Image (cartoon, coloured by chain):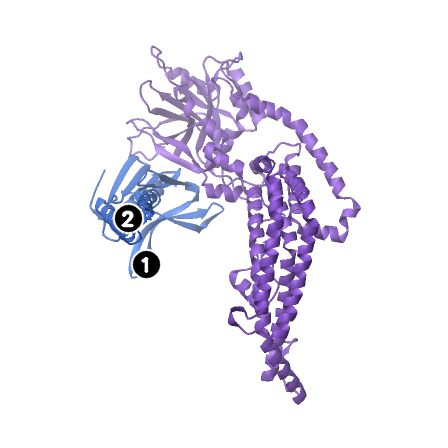
Chain colours: A blue, B purple
Amino acid sequence: MEDEAFTDISGKPISLDCQSHSSFCREFIISSPKVSMGKVMVYTCSVWLLAYAVFFFTQNTAVLSGAILVTLVGMMLHIHFVKVDHESLLVIGSLGIQVSSSYASGREITTFIEMSKIKDIVINEAIYMHQIIYYLCVLLKDPSEPDAVSSVVPLFQSSKPRLNCLVKVYKSCQEILSKCQ
Amino acid sequence: MVLKIFFPQCCNRAESGLLVGRWISGHDSAVVLAVIHYPFIPGQVKQYIQQMQAQSGVGLTVLGSWSLPKEGQESMESFLRDLSTIFPQQRWLQVSRQMGKMGFICEVVNRNQNGQETQQEAKKQNDDDEEEEKVIFVHYEQRKVMLSQLHPTESGDPDLDTEPPSELKQVFQTVARSQPLFFLDRYDDGPLKSTHWQSEGREASIIVELLKQASVPLCVLISWLLALWTWLCSIRIFSLYPLRFLSSKLSTCVQISYRTEHMRTLSSPKPAIEHKQFMRKGNILVSFLVDVGLGVLLMSWLYRDDHIATLANMLMPAADHVAKELEELLQWLMGAPAGLKMNRALDQVLGRFFLYHIHLWISYIHLMSPFIEGILWYGGLSACLGLTFALSLLSDMVALLTFHIYCFYVYGARLYCLKIYGLSSLWRLFRGKKWNVLRQRVDSCSYDVDQLFIGTLLFTILLFLLPTTALYYLVFTLLRLVVVLFQGILHLSVDFINSFPLFAMGLRLFRPYRLAEGVKFQVLCEEPGTALHLLMEINPLKCSTVVQLYRTPTYSCYPRDSWAALVKKLFVGELIYPWRHKSTKVD
């Protein structure tokens, strides 16, 4: 298990964990920083102060209970649907590639792509507003047309690691793919 | 290349024996379906496998041997090697496991063409040997994979040769088709003993079996009833023009024809072979049952506590109230509505015309008032056929009762439309232009003086009469839109009940492994010296995909025009029919 100091494209620290289960099976887990308590406190306090101000003018207690409900529901929705805890890439030679992202509430979304549909894994450049960012993606092919790229699946969408992290993952993946495709 | 062996979880602790399964061509993988235990007679094993192959259509073979030595048993290395000569195969797998250890060890014996054996061992730590055959064991839960259907399902002809199915699809298909293999359990007195997911005893449900037996005469009855109904509907008198036009407009008749189609699908005597047909039948049946259930619930509420009489008594005053409101509205329009000054003569004409119309309508309602309760009582009975019928009936009744609003709207719209067209044409004349019908464009044209004079006069008249007509048109269009909105809501809910795939949704919620979008792999703990072990779990379909895939095609009710086109039509005065009904698709 290796842990260097990687950051994502906005500068927040992330961590990369490479596990080698076998010579042809490797797993890469990129973890994003957790929900910071400071931010949670700031948001909650601001919503409640606003609600209290409205209550002060309208004297309606429904505003206060509404604010509490909104805070709770908003937090639950955020950790269940928005906040990604870690994303992982499992490469199994001659079987396929599994991409999974797990959210802060424990929910996991997994996709498995079979080796016959995979053409290659590459690092692509993209121009996003004023920056050029790099992202790792899987090129898929139709088994009936092995030369054409049918679609592109980008990896690590929420963690958005920088190039040094991507190069490491890329080199590791290519070792397996070149042997077992 | 890496050899992949799909191993069922139920056989993890099976006693030593032979591995029976199928090699998947082109992908260097094997699916293990069952383990046949010692002692056995090779001739009987071969006969059994041939029998199973004939019954299931799967290319079964003996893949190799499995050894899990109990305490005190010495290793049977040489015995196992001799087995490979009894069952001549291209490749022979020798899988072994030690009690207390989790990992398996696999030796692959290749037989090349000269009949000589070359043996390769698969161990994890040998990195530098390029000739090594590496083995992955993929553990799967046999019962779930057998019942599951991997999406996208292949549709239509299985002989279509576009591309060979993928590896996972072949694995799923192999396990699903090998059902005859799983009928042999340990209580059978046959010569062979095997281990698979059902070897502890065959599972079956009495209720399911009884339903299957009962469904045959039920299907016969339903198809006979349907034949009778179809004969009734095809009597000549019903294909006369007015009745046919009416029956295509009334949503109750449309719903009846819809349900007839559904019943026809359900009552076909052949059982559904393909997965899609099976799901379609299931969805139709469950939708129908839920519909009837909701209808009966509605009926039980309606006929209790004299609700019908209350409703009927409420209806007359409500109709009177609506008529009074409309009359007041017209009186307001005939005066100076919102401070606008109307053209007195035209105002009076239009106002009196509409007032007389309302008077006619209210007399007609009063005429029908003694029959209202009876109509409601008998109409409520139709809810026993389903909630959708009750809603369609309600929608039709609303359409009939607000027929006068529809008439007003049509009159107002036609008048306004004529006025707008007249105005635009005379405006062109005013500027010295003309519409060229041949070229579909505006061309210049020289008019005579008297043409210009009359044209300008008419233009002025129409222009100054515009606010009056426009106001009447606006008011009645708004009323019509309210009615159309209400009918649209009713139709949307009928459509929703008809088309929502309840059976597929229930299957997705309670048996998520049956509808599989893909698989998930998890690396099981590894021990040095053994092959890589993965656990394959089924990844169920997303709920939105389930709804999209298994929707029963219906006359879906959706807006015909975009918002911009609708506003344009309203402005010009064209008659709008905002909801479009797609015709029933035949799959």
Q: Seen in the image, is B207 located left or right of residue A17?
A: right
Q: Secondary structure at mark 2?
A: helix
Are tags 2 and 1 found on a single chain? yes
Numbered tag placed on residue A25 in the rendering: none
Identify which residue, B12 or B124, lies in the foreground.
B12
In the rendered image, which residue does mark 1 sit on?
A128
Q: Amino acid at mark 2?
A: Leu
Does residue B82 appear anywhere in the picture?
Answer: yes
Dot 1, how many residues are within 10 Å of its Cα: few (below 14), some (14-19), or many (20+)? few
Q: State the residue in front, B180 or B501.
A: B501
Question: Position of A82 compared to B499: left or right?
Answer: left
Give the vertical position of B409 relative to B49 (above or below): below
In the rendering, at what x and y percent does residue A59 appear?
Answer: 30, 50
In the rendered image, the residue lying farthest to the top is B72
Kindly indicate the quadrant of the structure image that contains residue B222.
top right
State which quarter of the image contains the N terminus of chain A: top left
Look at mark 2 in the image and give the residue it sits on: A166
- Residue at the outermost left position: A5
If the image is split into quadrants, where does the C terminus of chain A sit?
Answer: top left
Q: Name the residue located 30 percent from the left edge and 44 percent from the top edge.
A: A68
| Front-lying residue, B74 or B177 | B177
Q: Is residue B570 above or below residue B442?
A: above
Name the spot of residue B217 as percent of width and height, x first. Answer: 68, 27
- Given contact means CB atoms under 8 Å apart, are the residues at marks 2 and 1 in contact? no
Mark 2 Cα shell of 10 Å, populated few (<14), some (14-19), many (≥20): many
Q: Earlier in the sequence, mark 2 or mark 1?
A: 1
Q: How many marks?
A: 2
Q: Position of residue A98 (x, y in %)?
A: 37, 40
Viewer-closest of B172 and B130: B172
Which chain is home to disc 1? A
Nearest-to-viewer mark from 2 and 1: 1
Provide the chain ID for the residue under circle 2.
Answer: A
